[in-house]
Amino acid sequence: MTLFEIKEEEKKGNWARFIISPLDQGFGNTLGISLRRVLLGSLSGAAITKVSVAGVKHQFSTLKGMKEDVLDFLLNLKRARFSYQGEKPVKLTLSAKTAGEVKVSDIKLPATVKAANGDMVLANLAKGGKLEAEMELSSGVGYEAAEDRPTETIGEISLDAVFSPVLRVSYKVEETRVGRLTNYDKLTMEITTDGTITPKEALLEGSKILTSYLTQIISPKKVEKKEEVVLGSTMGAVGKLSVEEIGLPTRVANSLYKGGFDTVEKLVAATKEDLAKIRNLGEKSLKIIKVALAEKGVEFNA
């Protein structure tokens, strides 16, 4: 392996250009393709996933005193960028009663959250107008459609979420010279982020993710397989029923399916810790599950 250098050649705001050189022939494309893929789709970030606006029942409404439609306001919220490292969703609040621009910086944030584009305008209020909203900020990776987070709460609107903190990545590979030899690669990468992390931090984080995958190939860690508890013999036909067939609400059943608990016997074998990892499955949902199983004569202890 030829030793190479990484230089941050130029930087402007959330954009930076890096030169990685000299690389053995072919490794310019190998690193460029791999890093670009990881940077665009595998870095974690935060986004607003749910919104409730006072006086609004659905996203196609209008709000008295706000110049934008509610849909435009929601689209602007999708572009609001926040730095947040926590695993559990957090609540954000917005209360604007003064005529003029309502900006991201007007959102009240907990100490663990920081806005990256505070000057961005979310809406414009006329005299006497009022905008009050509650939002849920979640951390994640890549993109998540609003349809994957259904809500049964009236007035609560799910948003499509783009979690990736990297907006654009481009690269090019050129020949470079080492002494008299010219068959080496020079990789030039340009990275633009949303401001929640710097381009250099993004490059380092992407490299760590690639390294973790390669390390598993070099020094594989044993994957522990959980033993499945066979309950069919004691539960009979009930154990083979799907979670939809026991009368659970569609939202709860869908969450269980995504978590891998698609049958009654799998559900009963689950621990409370297993179920706690499933998105949108809280204490209220567990009570609904317990009642549905009790009606089938099955005890649920999670």
Image (tube, helix red, strand yellow):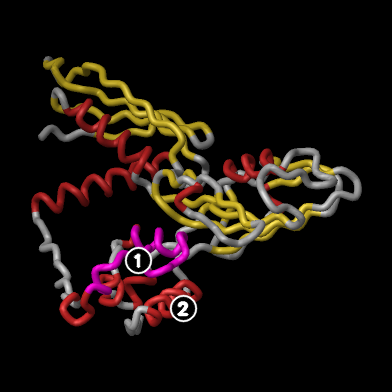
In the drawing, does residue 81 fall left or right of residue 58? left
Residue 188's place in the image compared with 213, above or below, is above
Q: Based on the displayed image, in which of its 4 quarters is residue 202 positioned?
A: top left
Dominant secondary structure, magenta: helix
Q: Residue at x 27, y 48 (%)?
A: 209
> Does residue 108 appear in this view?
no
Earlier-in-chain disc, 2 versus 1: 1
Could you tell me the amino acid type at mark 2? Lys
Q: What stretch is highlighted in magenta?
A: 237-257
Q: Name the residue under label 1.
A: 243
In the drawing, does residue 195 fall left or right of residue 171? right
Q: Where is residue 277 in the image (x, y as percent from the top left)?
A: 37, 67
Q: How many labels does the image show?
A: 2
Residue 76's place in the image compared with 275, above or below, is above
Q: Based on the displayed image, in which of its 4 quarters is residue 297 positioned?
A: bottom left
Q: Residue at x 71, y 46 (%)?
A: 103
